[in-house]
Amino acid sequence: MKTGSATFNIRNLLDLDNSKVYIGFVLFAIALVVWIFILKKLPLNVAQAFSVLQFVGVILASWLLLSEPISGLRWVGIAFVFLGVIIVGWTAK
């Protein structure tokens, strides 16, 4: 969606020329279905803790796909997020 947003025009919402935006919509829909299945299997407090990994995923994807830089301090933050998710997952009953 990030790369498609440069040429997106709300007036032409149904214009299918901007495939990157519509692929993003489809991926969001798939993520919603996956989230529903996760909620069926896990308690909300555990599932929500794991959902913060999406922020790490976005940072890493923007680094890999869009060549956006990741500072040293941000790497530390990513490590803390992983540590927090591990602690929550380890203590889940």
Image (cartoon, rainbow, N blue to C red):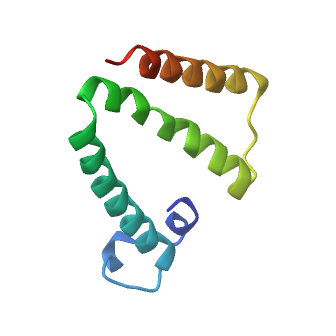
- Asked if residue 54 lies left or right of residue 73, the reply is left
Q: Residue at x 60, y 18 (%)?
A: 80
- Residue in front for this viewpoint, 84 or 65: 84
Is residue 50 depicted above or below 5 in this figure? Answer: above
Residue at 41% across / 63% down in the picture? 27
Quadrant location of the C terminus in the rendered image:
top left
Q: Taking 79 as reference, is 81 left or right?
A: left
- Above/below status of 39 relative to 29: above
Quarter of the view holding residue 6: bottom right
Q: Quadrant of residue 26?
A: bottom left
Work out which residue is located at the far left of the displayed protein and give it: 40
The spot of residue 62 in percent (x, y) is 65, 50
Viewer-proximal residue among 54 and 39: 39
Q: Residue at x 41, y 13 (%)?
A: 91
Please indicate whether residue 51 sits to the left or right of residue 67 in the image.
Answer: left
Residue pictured at 28% horizontal, 34% vertical: 42
Percent x, y for residue 66?
70, 56
| Nearer to the camera, 22 or 31 | 31
- Residue 67 image position (x, y, % from top left): 76, 52
Horizontal side, residue 41 vs residue 9: left or right: left
Tell me where residue 2 appears, x and y as whole percent.
Answer: 54, 59
The answer to whether residue 6 is above or below residue 65 is below
Residue 45 position (above or below residue 69): above
**Number of disc labels:** 0
Observer-nearest residue: 52 or 12?
A: 52
